[in-house]
Amino acid sequence: MSTAALPARGALRVAWPWLAAACGALLLWWLLDARLTRDLLDWLPYLASGFAMNVLISVLAMTLGTLGGVALGAMELSATRIVRAPAVAYVQVFRNAPHLVLIFATTYIFPFEIVVAGHYLPFPDWLKAVLGLAIPAAAYVAEIARGAILSVPTTQWDAAKGIGLSRGQTLRWIILPQCLRRALPPWMNLYASITMSTALASLVGVHELLHAATDASTAVRRDDFTIAIYLTVLLAFFLFCYPISRLTRRLERRLARS
Amino acid sequence: MLKGIDLTVAKGDAVSIIGPSGSGKSTILRCINGLAQPQAGRITVAGVRVDTLRSEAERIALRKRIGVVFQQYNLFPHLTVLENITLAPVRILKVPRAEAESHARDLLARVRLADKISAYPGELSGGQQQRVAIARALAMRPELVLFDEVTSALDPEMVGEVLAVIRELVREGLTSILVTHEMRFAEEISDTIAFTENGRIVAQAPPAELFYRSDNPRIRQFIGGFQGFRDAVQDREGI
């Protein structure tokens, strides 16, 4: 819409969901009685420590997934079949595997500690959950990277060579910046999706937000509190993921224009 | 692809290569700046034997001296017009940024796009993009510029503005080799026209001679195929 070009109205369009969310939260606050508010506040630090775990798992899973995925994506484009085939197989298998199954698999397949040169290194459940999510993340990132590389026409190489750039310079200044721009929106989408999947780790006993909420609910044992606490969980995920998806859409629109 | 190419371009000359599609016109240009490697034969550009260049560094040294303008413009879409033009001078020739930018402004004024300096290629028309591409090639102060069917991808109303820029450059003494299907334009600006067919240059001569006095039936047929020329040729021959 052309109104997006007007700064004031554009800002309002971006801001209104936030206003709505804030009003909703406030309304919730009013509806709840003082005791509920006090109980919620009491449990808030515990919930926050849980949510920190979600953020930690998502960041680590996405970091590992990105490193692995970029390598896999490059392998998928290899002219050599021996290099290409395993990458294609990996991507196909793990893009079609439920995240929960992978989290269960990594939790029960890996030992609780690893022996490295006589030292016992603990291998906690949350780290296994990181792996469980990094495995599909790598498969998705591989597809994103492959698509981004293919989206840059080969004529860009000719043009860069034509003005005297070397292969390395072309890659660095011409090809990769274009890949990154194309890859960033889907990559952020994936990050939001992986973040939401971190709640699955509660099912294998990782102390994260959903797990913390369940702890709180069982401890307080009151229906209104249970409802409020799970609404808080929803709100936390929304407040974290919504700005990401908003930013993604803005980037996508900017990309579509240029 | 190419079988018999013998072409000499003197400094300050404009040479046009014409001929049917697939006859090797663009490949000649790619051989000249080392984007393609000939299997046999010799290519010398400004004293450099292009066919003997083996390392990438040697080819890069050559390409700094030869500008190329492509059919599809091939501007860098993530960079502004100014950045497209100054990238190579600043990064490759190590020209100070201020100097490169002032040169870029001069060039943009010459291609009549001074007001588009901060635009992105995607915001420009085809003709404007192609003129930026010409400015980008000139920014390296090349000794030779290769124009590879630079108007073939343009809408008819944009062809004129691009040709006007090239015409001016050629008049100012730019050494250039053009692959083109614009017969009238080639006739007007070229010192020599080369006609290619099946990977050979079958004839090369000044425009007047090649267009109107050639006794090669294939050339007469090809040129005659372009509307307007048939009449012109017939007029002169009094048919």
Image (cartoon, helix red, strand yellow):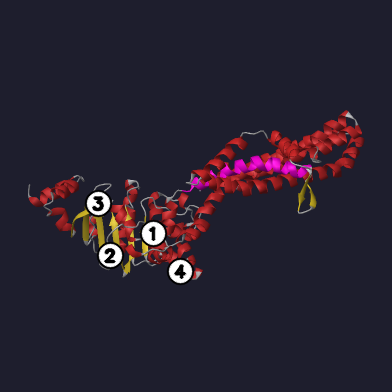
Any part of residue B230 in sight? yes
Q: CA distance from mark 1 to mark 3?
A: 37 Å
Q: Quadrant of residue A160?
A: bottom left
In this view, the mark in front (1 or 4):
4
Q: Residues within 10 Å of mark 3 (few under 14, many from 20)?
A: some
Q: Considering depth in this image, is B15 or A77 the residue closer to the camera?
A: A77
Q: Considering depth in this image, is B57 or A197 the residue closer to the camera?
A: B57
For marks 3 and 2, the one nearer the N-term is 2
Label 1 belongs to which residue? B112
Label 3 belongs to which residue? B199
In magenta, the rendered stretch is: A125-152
Q: Indicate the chain on which mark 3 is placed.
A: B
Q: Quadrant of residue A132?
A: top right
Q: Amino acid at mark 1?
A: Arg
Any part of residue A19 in sight? no
For marks 1 and 3, the one nearer the N-term is 1
Label 4 belongs to which residue? B93
Tell whether label 3 touches label 4 (CB within 8 Å).
no
